[in-house]
Amino acid sequence: MHISEYQKFDGIALAGLLHKGDVAPVDLMKCALELGAGRASELNALCYVDAEQALNAAAGAKLKGQFGALPFLLKDSGLAAKALPSSVGSRLFADMASPIDSTLNARFIEDGFVAFGRTTVPEFCMAPTTEAVQNGGPTLNPWDVSRSAGGSSGGAAVAVSTGVVPIAHGSDGGGSIRIPAACCGVYGLKPSRGLVPMGPSRGEAWGGLAVDGVLTRTVRDTAAALDGVVGMELGAPYAAPEMPGRFSDLLEQPFQRPLKIAKWTSAFDGIEVAEDCVRAVNYTAELLSSLGHEVVDAPLPPIKYSSFLRAHQDVLAASVTMTVNGKLRVSPDADWRSKLEPAMLDAYEIGKTLSAETYALAINRFHAIARQMEVYLWDYDMVLSPSLTKLPAELGTLTMDTDFRSFRNLVGKYTTFLAIINASGQPAANVPVYWTDENLPIGVQLIGRFGQDADLIKISAQLEAAAPWIGRYIPA
């Protein structure tokens, strides 16, 4: 198979070729490696790729699960994988090995994914851009290399948008799937809290904000990938409602009635929203209306956004302190401070000073937002909003070369519509239906009720059919 042909297919189509015997796993892996060594390498999207090991794994792979033996990439988020080290984007954690596979990675493997490397992230996955010193430079936006690919799943979004893989692992603790999906023009869904397993080594991350998922070029690939990994994990602290069936089977089922969708075009605390982002929302609203749904201009819920930002910062800082101290207990390092970027070193110092009361109040703030959002959605089925308040960030404008709170305040003005949905635990997706005249993707976000991931996937599929985007990728 030639790489130009490989790039045209989504994951389900490639898996079909594998299961029919029309193509061998090693042929697909050769395409993925060639693309990874080409454009994706120029954009600085991959790490921990071992081509020889990848080819051997593909050559010996037996077809299983939905995807047979499909090339795949894990985010460098520390998701435990025996076959791949991780750095979490930090020099302090470079080449960290795991003796076990996480529950999620084990489910990926059983469903036919063959991971051959990881995708780049910012340090500790705590930025909306991917510009970690550990990566040797920024991860570039494939549509405009003067801009960021987004973060923290920045490398994953680049890998999907350049066709290295049709499906890549991502995670989202404040928009980290939706941000890069918006910047790179791919589909990215943050599942409901508790839908995707996080164990066995941890029960939650960032006070319940963080969840795992995938980035894809088609909605059906996301549906199928989730079909293979969702489900209650023994001992997990959270559980999403049981799904009504396989997402893949529900994709084309019509809604029993038109949906009522709230439209947001203004932001909390009067934060400015770029005109292109508003245009993207209005364009999507017209598409939804043409599909028979009701889209109404709606007020924002009464969330105290500045209080949420502070709570979010406190929980992230506490996580940095816990993570660094855990590493140093196992592996003391006299030079550890020099291996952290300025904002993360400052976050560590802040975390050391936080009281138990401050942390508990932050968690209570998240829970309050969850209730506010669910009550708000009594009047609507979904919310339509911009994914970001601005165009994809220019390189160097959102780096960690500053103090932690100043950095996170800037992030909060860029990702205003995203992290609140991590607090609420609801599903939300970036849908890439709008592009500027300069061929730059502008994402829009759809937010569903908690546990209603199937409805979110269905409406995404309707938008995909109305304004297809699978043909928008960076060719070899």
Image (cartoon, rainbow, N blue to C red):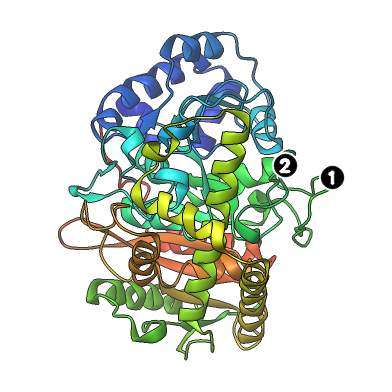
Residue at position x 72%, y 39% in the image: 201
Q: Position of residue 434 (x, y in %)?
A: 31, 64
Q: Residue 271, percent across and down?
A: 33, 81
User: What is the three-letter code of the residue carrying label 1?
Assistant: Leu
| Observer-nearest of 308 and 118 | 308
Q: Amino acid at mark 2?
A: Gly
Q: Measure how far apart labels 1 and 2 are at the Cα level.
A: 9 Å
**Residue 444 appears in which quarter of the rendering?**
bottom left
Query: Residue beneath label 1, please?
Result: 234
**On screen, 168 above or below 246?**
above
Give the residue displayed 40% in from the left and 42% down from the top. Answer: 340
- Quadrant in the picture for the N terminus: top left
User: Helix, strand or loop at disc 1?
Assistant: loop
Residue 256 sits in quarter: bottom right
What residue did someone put label 2 on?
199
Q: Are marks 1 and 2 in contact (CB under 8 Å)?
A: yes
Q: Position of residue 101 (x, y in %)?
A: 67, 28
Residue 411 occupies which quadrant of the picture?
bottom left
In percent of width and height, residue 441 lies at 28, 58
Of label 1 and label 2, which has the lower sequence position?
A: 2
